[in-house]
Image: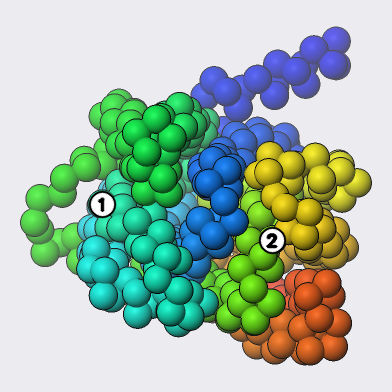
Amino acid sequence: MSTNFKFTDLKRCFSKPTDLGQGSVGMTLLQMSIPAVSMMLLNTLFFMVDTIFISWLGELPTASVSLTFPVNITLFAFLEGVSGGTTALVGQNMGRGRLSNARKVAFSGLALGYLLSACAVPMLFPGISAAIFNQLGALGNTEMLRLSYAYNMWLPLMAPLITYTFVSNSVFRCQGDTVTPLVCMAIANLINGVLDPIFIFAFGWGVGGAAAATFVGRVFAVVYIRRKMKRNRDISLPFLLPLRRAFTRYWKSISAIGFPVTLATGSIALGFGGVNRVLATFGHHAIAAWMLGIRVEDFYFTIAMGVGSALTPFLAFNYGRRDLPRMMAGIKAAAWIAGSLMTVTGTIIFIYPHVFLGLFHPSERVLDLASRSIRISMLVYPIVVMHFVLGSSFVATGYSFFGTATQLTRSIFARIPAAHFFAWWLGERGIWWFQPFSYLISSFVTLFCFVYMMRKIRQDFAVS
């Protein structure tokens, strides 16, 4: 009887939104985390599928596309900042029963996202593209510059589409609905996976075909999410916003929470760029191995990201209700869920990295380097869980600057110097130790910030 009840309870995550303020904390987080983790894995598949087909074109195209990651991450940094600020404020207002304010925040967040997505427009110009990719490791290689431009020129066209899905998915998560974002990403992945081989090989578009397939997938995702939005009685976001000054009303509040998130994600781009420059001294094989290793690791790390994305609206909602015990229980439950899933997945990938890397048809040298990268990185999975879970609490409560401090420490202040040091000390085969070293150093910053934040929250709740 008990088993049947749990199974029925679990099925609710695929049928109706979860009540963030009532019921079992563990079950609530599990109900939200399953679709959220699935969505993150599908998001990873977007780039995974592209990388698989591109890798069949050769190691130079693979390395060239790797150079585009910092640029893409920079755009996502802006949009994740808007999404994080919107999620926190919408969740807090809904927790306080202020639906009208929550609706205004969502509209304001979408308008700000559209404005920031225009930052991708310069990538349409080959001269600007070449200048940027030369700094990121192309080092004057004309073929790498051509391939990088062919792949990245689609980014400005996709930026508004990505913006709409980011903000819309934030709204649905704040309402306890993590299934709609999951289906949205599944549609985009299905279209991308079908069109990739057609555009890349049948049409002969090469790396540009992979980006074109992604663009079409994003279009279908927007069509789906817009249809769901029309049926959302509480908050319904149109794709095309009318010009209204009122949409700027919450930009300052969203930015106060979101800008630190943007800096944190943006630091990843700088970190990748810095590491690529170090790896470039060993040749394009090392850059290709770094990219393939990241692609496989993504399936491992995105579990924590998915649980973290489910935890953020949960914490924001209960922070609005001033329910500290439920917030702490949510943080513990999220840590257990992420830790359990990552232990199983990480063990499989650690033992059999060659099986996953074989999808990319790498050379023996790239396969060896990528395998070492994966196995060394996975030694710090408990720290990874802590970073994403506590990072979600920073965003949900408005203390997102602490997440920025943690990410800057890991991505720039620790990672880049460590890459230089281990490259000098251990060479091509040992440089990969920069990953666990940077996570270890940043973990001290994370714990310090979390303790300080909890002290401030307890004081605020005691006064109110």
Check disc 2: other Cα within 10 Å, few if <14, some if 14-19, many if 20+: many
In front: label 1 or label 2? 2
The image quarter containing residue 56 is top right
Which of 237/48 is in front? 48
Task: Locate residue 73, reporting x and y percent.
Answer: 47, 64
- Look at the picture and state if 356 lies above or below 298: above
Q: Residue 314: image x %, image y %?
A: 58, 49
Q: What residue is disc 1 on?
A: 157
Left or right: 179 as drawn, with respect to 1: left
The N terminus - image quarter? top right
Residue 290 location, quadrant: bottom right
**Does residue 395 show up?**
yes
Query: Which structural element holds mark 1?
Result: helix
101 vs 193, left or right, is left
Where residue 423 sits in the image (x, y, percent)?
77, 83
Task: Give the x, y percent position of residue 21.
Answer: 59, 43
Residue at the image position 45 percent from the left and 55 percent from the top: 87
Question: Counting other residues with Cα less than 10 Å from the Cα at mark 1, is it few (<14), some (14-19), or many (20 or more)?
Answer: some
